[in-house]
Image (spheres, rainbow, N blue to C red):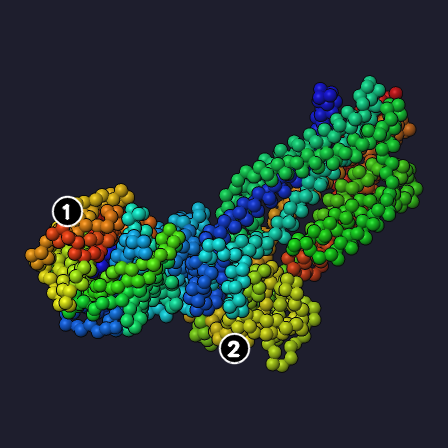
Amino acid sequence: MSRVLGRIFIASLARRRLATALSLFAIALGVALGLAVQIIHAAALDEFGRGMRLLAGEADLQVAGSREGFDDALYGPLAMREEVADASPVVELEVRLPSHGRSLPLFGIDALRAAHVHPALMPQATEPGREGAALAWLQPDALFLSPAAQAELGVAVGDRLDVVAAARVVSLHVAGGVPGARQGRALAVMDIAAAQQLFGRVGRITRIDLSLKEGLDVAAARDALAAGLPPGVEVLTPSAAEELAAGLSRAYRVNLTMLATIALVTGGFLVFSTQFLAVARRRQEFAFLRALGLDRGSLMRGLLVEGAVVGLAGGLLGIVLGHGIAVVAFAVAGGDLGAGYFSALSPALRFDPVASGAYLLLGVLAGLAGAWQPAREAWHMLPALALKSGDEAAMFRFRAHPRSASACLAGAAALCLLPSLGGVPVFGYLAVALILVGAVLVLPILVRGFARIASLLRRPLWRLANARLAAAPGQGVVAGAGVVASVALAVAMAIMVASFRDSVDRWLTAVLPADLYVSASPQGTSGFLDPAVLGRIAALPGVSRTMPLRFDTLRLDDRRLPVVLIARPLDGGKLLPLVGLATPPAAGEMPAWVSEAMADLFAVATGDALVLPLGGKSVTFRVAGVWRDYARQQGAVAIELADYRAVTGDLVANDVGVLLAEGASFDTVAAAVRDIVGENTVRIASPGEIRARSLAIFDRTFLVTYAMEAVAVLIGLFGVSTSFAVLAIARRKEFGMLRHLGMTRREVGRLITLEGVLTAAAGTALGLAAGTAIAVVLIEVVNRQSFHWSMDLTLPIGGLLAFAVTVIALAGIAARVSGYQAMRGTAVMAVREDW
Amino acid sequence: MDWRCFAHALAFAVCGVLAVPAADAAPDYPPVLPGATLRFPADGGAHPDYRTEWWYVTGWITDDRGVERGFQVTFFRVRTGIGEDNPSRFAPRQLVLAHAAIADPAVGRLLHAERSERELEPLAGAETGATGVWIRDWQLAWGQDHYRSRVDAGSFAFDLRFDPSGPPVLNGDKGFSQKAPDPKHASHYYSRPQLVVSGSLRVDGNTVPVKGRAWLDHEWSSELLPEGARGWDWIGINLHDGGSLMAFRMRDERGGSMWSAGTLRAAGGAVRALQREQVALTPQRRWRSPRTGAEYAVEWVIDIDGRRLELRPLMDDQELDSRRSTGAVYWEGAVRLFESGREIGRGYLEMTGYAERLRM
């Protein structure tokens, strides 16, 4: 069997090199993309988790509140609790480094306590000539940098490092290292009291890490400890915290994996179409082999092996490619593929045998699946009949399946109504798949319809094309299905991305109402603007109004990530991009506007009461509306700055938006603001700059998506042209006959082109319709469930039409080129094959 | 007289303070001057203005089966001079540190543990007004008419009550104890010898009642080490006749005596301050630590104003090696005092500065 296999089956792959290569490459691409996404995210998540574990150290539990922290008076009583063996208070900050144009995570710790709970953060005073490590730890200007931070910043022990504290630049002394910090983790450590004083956080800490007495039940201890805590402060297990953070990027990862799957499915489909046509062409050969004694089981196995070999080769190539892509992606876009989930991580890339094996298997399965139907066909073949020429036409007797098609489409509609599974829109993706299948099932009907319309022209060529497509719609379907799938996916992505970008653009305009933005903490939490500075900016000539912004995070429960709090003047919600109806709250109630993500995640709606933990108290707000927010996937709530200040007494701001008076110049006011706050402490930007920057980030995020999609579509189109080529070769006899009947080579070429164009037009029309439907599913179901944001549907009609015309033209050209190839021989030779 | 131990216990920390004043203006540490009158119980409490202070209890205890062990519990307070203007509750103005150890001949070496914290209610602190110092559940406190100390270090634990059998013994000149030829190196220093011990001890998971005799030293100062001091040797002995003996010598780099002094309290209560020339501590048998390689004199001849006394340890290996944490290595152990071959008292011997010079 094996020698037969080698000679008859696998060798046949070599004979149709182009088709085999394309199938192989499509599978390789699917495997490579899927594997690359897997590797990159596994590495990034791994690094992320390791980082969180490093920071959690030996802690069994973490007491955490908002980004701005909670009352540090909680620390003493908690540390003295019966259940607690050791407690370590932490002030976590992102410190802006003005001279490096970046920020650095800084941990204010109690070095005397940290050794027990998170030894990895222990500072080590290594400066020669300065004795007294314990006291060196405590010095108010002493900063300890991890090896990675020292390397990245180019600072050595003994140097000084400038940091932004409030709206000042402060020079700190690099007194030593943090040797326990993992390789590649840039972080700084300083004394907790010094950090509190320096960064204006006296009285507040952001975390208390607890290790429990041995033998205690962690869950029970957690409940007991949580009972006495003020609102907004929760007790988490480190693994839960890690899971929450990793969950944030899950939807994005699933999205990318889905795109990889599409490439893989495309590959499988190409295997199908090439195998199918190859089986059709080799029908007589197989019948002959059967007559010589090859049993049908061996024949089927042989054909399956052909598919599997293509899958295996594609899979192996894909594994190599996938690792290559991962390396390049790491270098170019970082561990989050540009999406910003894991910024500041530099994960190490490793060969992942399990994932590689799994994707190799998927590649082989794609090859097998593609070869299955043609192999079954061969199995069913009756050798006596198949030995006669023309029997292969039986294979192309595809029937339209209007019932199945409508069932698929109805199923897709129903699936769209189902909620997500664990934050992943499984049913949305299934609906997309069903729409595709439905569209392919509709295709034979449509192709026949198109042909019938064409035949109305009553010209011989058109009628020939009609007759051909009506008699053997299967051939058209095989080629056209690729067109439908590729066009549908390309159109869907184009519509979705256009809608998204358009919505983001409009959203940015809505959320940036001021003329000039002064940001004290564009990257970090170490800078802020105090009331005196805010007052002086407001009093500047040329300033008509200032809108200070205060950011914080609020922990509403221990099962979800904290939501972002935005306190700023909102003019009763007029300054927010509201969606749906807004109802102003009754007098005496404080309004809050929740983002769509928050409305989804926390099940709050306009008119509901919303209790927010502000300043250690539970404060009741009334939800006055829902607004669109593309920036904070974990949810955000906006409240009036005046309410925030009244409740918390906190008068500082992170940013301030400045509205210019009539005729005032941006540059003059910007310079005046710089005079007040200093050159390096704040960033001043116009809304235009911020918008441009945000859209650049948006484009970068989608760059990977675009690239993957483009490649998948390209492969699909290539597949279509190979289908035509193979079809044309299979029809050599037919073309020879037409030549004998008096058609010129040119006319036959036009016939082929016409058929190709008709098929492609049907496929493209269907692809446009299906693509629009898929785009709606992506926008309304997949995005909504993955990221909890809505967007307005935008149809880039011009672009889509141009794309459709291009696809049809390409299909025509492909058909024409393959037709010429098929007619290279003389008509006599071509016809002679029949006898 | 255990401040030197403290200096070593916090080898990194305190030497840092001493060697290099904080970058910011150093706080005004009050000087230790002769002529101050110590009042009790007020002076049993903390003196937070001074740079360093400690309460040091050592003693011999016997359990209900007659097993004899030594114990030590020490609380240190240090004013760091850091963060004095910082309103944060974590401001490290004052640190509190503690060492605890059990000398059990059946174990053959010390069981010991330590803790250090910044002063922070309710975790750690040193009260003024009366003795009261603690780090979480470790504590030493004066209540009405006795001290109580509780320590749980996991591998061992004790809860002991100390009843004084006499008034505090003021060392040096009415509590002004000079440490070096220059009188600026001095401390306020009193001892509570002959403390009657009762309570419980847990070792090897068994809690047993114990009784015994102990000694408390309380000392505070601002100006510690004299130039060129390498280490010191100190004893505090409860004499069987009801009296007590404290003596120390400070060694220079070559091991010679830089300074020595002592206090001898007679059974009747009469206290004699022993001057430099009246006290001589002479090393005899030596023992080398297998861990650190340091060589300690574990037997001594002590000449007190014409009386020749001999000192022998409960066991040789009473070295406290905490290099993995604070870095301190010293010998702190239970000893017996003999005169003419007869045991006349029991107490503690402390030797520091013998280990290899530590990386600092």
- Place of residue A139 in the rendered image (x, y in percent of width and height, measured from the top left): 32, 61
Q: Which mark is residue A504?
A: none
Q: Residue at x 52, y 56 (%)?
A: A217
Amino acid of disc 2: Ala
Q: Residues within 10 Å of mark 1 (few under 14, many from 20)?
A: some
Residue of label 1: B284
Q: Residue at x 57, y 65 (%)?
A: A556
Residue A141 placement: quadrant = bottom left
Asked whether residue A756 appears in the rendered view, the answer is no
Q: Residue at x 52, y 57 (%)?
A: A218
- Place of residue A340 in the rendered image (x, y in percent of width and height, measured from the top left): 55, 54
Amino acid of disc 1: Gln
Residue A9 placement: quadrant = top right
Residue A772 in the image: above or below residue B137: above
Please give left or right for residue A166 compared with residue A340 in the image. left
Give SS at disc 1.
loop
Tell us which disc is closer to us: 1 or 2. Answer: 1
Residue of label 2: A646
